[in-house]
Amino acid sequence: MEQIKPINNRRDFLKTSGMIGAGLLIPSLTLAKATTLEEGNIHQFGKRQGYTDQISILISMMDWMRATVLRSVDGITQKELDFLLDEESNSIGAMLMHLAATERFYQIHTFDYREWGDFDKKDTDMWNVGSQLGDKARKELQGKPLSFYLDHLSAVRENTKDMLKTKDDGWLMEETDFFGGQPTNNYCKWFHVVEHESNHNGQIKFLKSRVV
């Protein structure tokens, strides 16, 4: 598997006025002085070592949702992983790859300040099948072990966490026109990555229940 390296942020578009406005929008929390949370307990949302206060909350949500997805596929069989409900459905394996691909593209968009779709060929070659799904994914994402998908998910998430250590709460509130052409901040974009996993986790559970 191709090694995924952290993306360097070469530009800083955050202006002083934007930082002041962002500060007014971020909920007032005092996580910096909070007691260190129990190591490995995902059910305590709060300060995470190496992250700013609001990014700690985002990391808390990401960890909780990822653990939920991993529980859904724990012990899954190859038949369940590759099962297609009908000729237009996606397999559980394909959806896992879709989650990894989506997160990778959000990394490029938010960390490298690239317009959505402005991705390098090495990334589109690696991730487009999982991102777009459809017939190609139904053909190519078959017969691969669960570890194939989990390795991709883990590598992408590790990169996300490394990059978030270089960001602060002001960065979370930076905006570009995005969802529906409306101003959308990075907090919303990364929350979407979390809820996107929740959405597909429901599909994963449904498909497992339909395998015969």
Image (tube, rainbow, N blue to C red):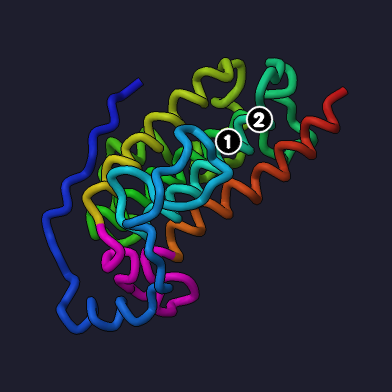
**Residue type indicated by callout 1:** Ala
- Write down the region rendered in magenta: 168-187
Instruction: Report whether 81 appears left or right of 187.
Output: right
Circles 1 and 2: CB distance less than 8 Å?
yes
The residue positioned 53% from the left and 51% from the top of the image is 194
Q: Is residue 8 above or below residue 153?
A: below
Q: Residue 19 occupies which quadrant of the picture?
A: bottom left
Q: Residues within 10 Å of mark 2 (few under 14, many from 20)?
A: few
Instruction: Give the spatial CA distance, label 1 vs label 2.
Output: 6 Å
Q: Is residue 115 above or below residue 87?
A: below
Q: Is residue 178 magenta?
A: yes
- Residue sitting nearer the eye, 30 or 141: 30
The residue positioned 65% from the left and 50% from the top of the image is 199
- Give the quarter of the figure containing the N terminus: top left
Kind of element beneath mark 2:
helix
The residue tagged 1 is 67
Where is residue 77 shown, x and y percent of the image? 71, 16
The residue tagged 2 is 71
Q: Is residue 65 visible?
A: no
Instruction: Report whether 25 appears left or right of 96.
Output: left
The residue positioned 50% from the left and 41% from the top of the image is 63
Name of the residue lying farthest toward the left: 10
